[in-house]
Image (tube, rainbow, N blue to C red):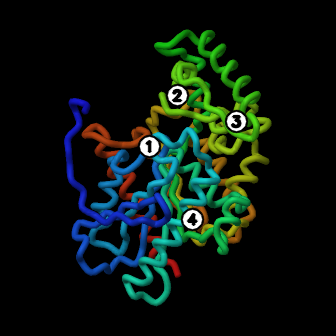
Amino acid sequence: MSSDFQPSLQPGILHNYAPRLTAFEYAPAPDAKDGKPNSLLFIGGLGDGYYTVPYVNDIAAALQTGKWSVYSVQLSSSYGGWGMGSLDKDVEEIGKCVEYVRKYKSAKTLTEGPGKIVIMGHSTGSQDVLHYLYSQTPDSEVASTTRPRPSVDGAIMQAPVSDREAILSTLKSGNEHGSPEELQKVFDQLVAMAKKESHVEGKDVLLPLWMLEKIGLSDTAITATRFLSLASPDSPGAPREDDLFSSDVTDPRLQETFGMISNRGFLKKSLLVLPGGADEYAAPWLDKEKTLERWREATVKGSSNPDIWDSNSGVIPGAMHSPSGPDQAQPREELVSRVKSFLGNIEKEG
């Protein structure tokens, strides 16, 4: 146990929304009559799970007196499972949680029709959100359910950053494991190994942990397929599934991702995008404002919904990747304020 860890208690309700998958509902008084018809479903990033993103508590506290419940969604890729996961699998599980919460709230609040549901991703959870909104329904999802992926009323992407550019930044600067030249050599070896062995006799393989650690990836077990998706070595010409937020992604590619949100029909209302102005995981060469504008243009192009890109979107000045601690009080307050305003807009719309 680390010396700065402080045990704490968070009251709430643990929901088993699918086999071996749970979601935690922030509920100060779990036994109280539920007058909250609307739901915000939070999805963490790589390595995240329950209670690993502190600002979720601030959001839950800010919404305590309103009509929104906050859920933290656990996926099979949560905590250390991300190295053997995929965006397709995450989206399938998120869809199951959306469906569960919609049925649960409709029965519990006794409202006429379901309440609003918004999905919110942090970091790589933002990749999940975008993938949920733009991608076609994969065969595995079709096979597991007789219903299409459920639509959501709103979606939020907080701290969307490129894992590929984060890796490239490490390769350019070097680290305690080696010089830029040494790290590039290890990276090239990993890429060659992953491309050769991503499917041996129809099975994926795990890459050497010591090599992954050298280039800045943790000691989590990572498959060749997920590594290639995150590192996307053939980008920008041939981006892999996870390479959604790199600054050098082409305009045609943005039209295939952000530009397809409206056409797919999984988003009923609006999208809120909140990069951090001081995000330590963003590549140092990134022009955040320019990149955000490219995403906005791709999203609104061809959409018949004038409000698909929410006006609360924007780079939050001074915000780190996950704003927490006393020195991040102001960015955290602005983050919570923008989320609350966005939910208010979703709530008002028919």
Q: Residues within 10 Å of mark 4 (few under 14, many from 20)?
A: some
Mark 4 and 2 residues: CB-CB less than 8 Å, in contact?
no
Badge nearest the viewer, 2 or 3: 2
Quadrant hosting residue 171: top right
User: Is 117 above or below relative to 253?
Assistant: below
Q: Which residue is mark 3?
A: 248
Quadrant hosting residue 83: top right
Residue at 31% x, 41% y: name it.
328
Quadrant of the snapshot with the N terminus? top left
Q: Where is residue 58 shown, x and y percent of the image?
A: 30, 55
Residue at 32% x, 73% y: name it.
66
Nearer-the-camera pick, 71 or 266: 71
Q: Residues within 10 Å of mark 3 (few under 14, many from 20)?
A: few
- Residue 335 numbered tag: none
Quadrant hosting residue 150: bottom right
Mark 3 and 4 residues: CB-CB less than 8 Å, in contact?
no
Which callout, 1 or 2, points at the residue further toward the start of the chain? 1
Q: Amino acid at mark 3?
A: Asp
Badge nearest the viewer, 3 or 4: 4
Q: Which residue is mark 4?
A: 95
CA distance for labels 3 and 1: 29 Å
